[in-house]
Amino acid sequence: MIANQQRIEQHINLLSEYTATPGAGVTRLTYSKDDLDARNYIKDKMKEYNLSVSEDGLGNIFGKLVGSNPEAPSVLVGSHFDSVPNGGAYDGAAGVIVGLEVAALYQEQQIQPVNSLEIIAMVEEEGTRYGGGLMGSRGMMGLLSEEDFQALVDKDGISIKEAMTSIGLDCTKEKYRDPKSIKAFLELHIEQGPILEEKNISIGVVDAVVGLTQLEVTVQGMAGHAGTTPMDRRADALVIAAEIISTFPKLAEEIGHGTVITTGQLEVFPNGSNVIPNKVIFSVDIRSGDEKNVQYSISKVRQLIESKTTPTIRTTIEQLLYTTPKMMDKNIGTILTETCEKLDIPYCHINSGAGHDAMIFSDYTACGMIFIPSRDGLSHCQEEWSDVNDLAKGATILYETALRLTEGQHDKQSN
């Protein structure tokens, strides 16, 4: 194994320090001070590994090792570096750090690639601050219009432009990346589930990524005094929202085929202990490996929500994100499995139940993705942990794979 475990572990530990919640997990929101500290660290390491560094109009970071044929499309390696609130040190960040390790290995081995190698660290994959998720990759591929981008505001009313300007980023820079300039995208991610650990397998070669949609639901009722408004005269938005949300587990079970429906965000207005809530906004996350099930779930959720509309209760639904199930590139998958076999690293094929930037890129270029085990299957929490030995194995596999791709031994195939 060629990857440097100590270097990888140091990156993990240092990057995890850039959090708004020290001692309570990693909270690194896009365009925050912690984002700025993390991006400066990432950029410094890119420069240390002889990469030329740039940022686009979304705030995505690129470290480029120019190939001997600079006009040829690049091989991209990386992931995202934002987090969920009180999350872990590995989700997304592990993929960025493995990308840095690939660049370090190119430097140490004095590799001069034919196709350029680019290490990429993307923003707002989680959608924690500006909603929808996968913003860095969606914006790069032209799936987020400039009008929609500029209209985004966070829960405190801070616009994208204000937030980016506050940490010295320029939102007027080019955001779109011509897919023809990308030969392939490689991403390592923690599994966020229990399968690899239970099988005692170090590497999961991802064949497909689940389809998903994210809805934002608003229930509008009427405020009133908690003590003086009779129960039969109330238009309590929170009660209606709770009735809807409590139905999701049974609905997902009835649809079956691995379908999951989740509410993870909920805002109550005016949020007073003695005031009947007049408005509730909540999220609905729907996922399935079969697009028919995603579509059917959306239809059933819409029917459920609309059935709660009365003369005093109004409901609205906004679809923030929709992606179909995505297949990874078979030829890159073959390279990944051949590399595992060559290095005698146990692997299995696996599907992803979580969304990743690779699912966006897969419509435009060849994508390969690998998972490493998550202890107890935990993720999106401060207990999230993966073994640095597995990270080093993953880094070595992506290094060997990138080496073949940047030397022109693999031509991009359509999915």
Image: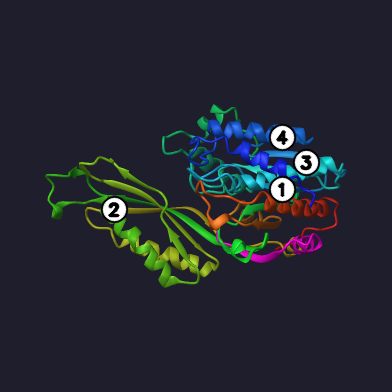
**Disc sitting over residue 104 in the figure:** 3
Looking at the rendered structure, the secondary structure element under dot 4 is helix
| Towards the viewer: 342 or 199 | 199
- The answer to whether 314 is drawn above or below residue 39 in the figure is below
Q: Which residue is mark 4?
A: 45
- Of pointers 1 and 2, the one earlier in the residue sequence: 1
Q: Is label 1 or label 4 in front?
A: 4
- Of pointers 1 and 3, the one earlier in the residue sequence: 1
**Disc sitting over residue 77 in the figure:** 1
- Of pointers 2 and 3, the one earlier in the residue sequence: 3
Looking at the rendered structure, the secondary structure element under dot 2 is strand
Looking at the rendered structure, the secondary structure element under dot 1 is strand
Q: Residue 415: x and y, percent?
A: 70, 63
- Residue 345 counted in the magenta span: yes
- Of pointers 2 and 4, the one earlier in the residue sequence: 4
| Distance from the alpha carbon under mark 1 to that under mark 3 | 13 Å
Apparent side of residue 401 relative to residue 38 in the rendered image (left or right): right
Image quadrant of residue 89? top right
Apparent side of residue 97 relative to residue 289 in the rendered image (left or right): right
